[in-house]
Image: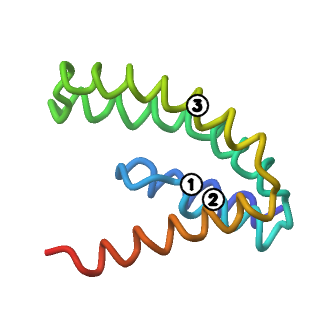
Amino acid sequence: MIIPFIAGLLSGIVGGMGIGGGTILIPILVFILHVDQHVAQSINLIFFVPTAIVALSIHIKNHRVDLKVAAIIALFGIVGAILGSRFAVSVASGILKKMFGFFLFTMGIYQILRK
């Protein structure tokens, strides 16, 4: 049971920094714990709520959040979450895994190349 503990801890640290804990959590769940991609992404979403609340409260307390911009992003994020989740459940697990991998790869390249 040490791997889920480590996965949660690392994902929480990365998520608290605003990077996105799912970049750590989902690969650990899929490749090490052999969880289905749909289930891994669902676990990530459940994991995200309490960690985001804690991180957000700390960032708000330190005056690091523009609440007007955050409200607009949150509104459209909810719409995107509805559309994205409906799409995700209609896609086969193998394809979803490849799409997630492509996304991570693309974001990694972007991070390397940006100034």
- What amino acid is at disc 3? Leu
Q: Position of residue 85 (x, y in %)?
A: 65, 35
Task: Give the spatial CA distance, label 1 vs label 3.
Answer: 19 Å
Q: For numbered disc 2, what is the local secondary structure?
A: helix
The quarter of the picture where residue 65 lies is top left
Between residues 33 and 2, which one lies in front from this camera angle?
A: 33
Looking at the rendered structure, the kind of residue marked 2 is: Leu
Q: Reply above or below: 100 against 65.
A: below
- Which residue is disc 3 drawn over? 83
- Residue 28 location, quadrant: bottom right
Q: Earlier in the sequence, mark 2 or mark 3?
A: 2
Residue underneath mark 2 = 25
Q: Which mark is residue 22?
A: 1
> Which residue occupies 78% across, 49% down?
38
How packed mark 1 is, by other alpha carbons closer than 10 Å (few <14, some 14-19, many 20 or more), is: many
Label 3: how many Cα within 10 Å (few below 14, some 14–19, many 20+): few
Identified at 41% across, 47% down, the residue is: 16
- Are the residues tagged 1 and 2 within 8 Å (C-beta)? yes
Q: Between disc 1 and disc 3, whose residue precedes?
A: 1
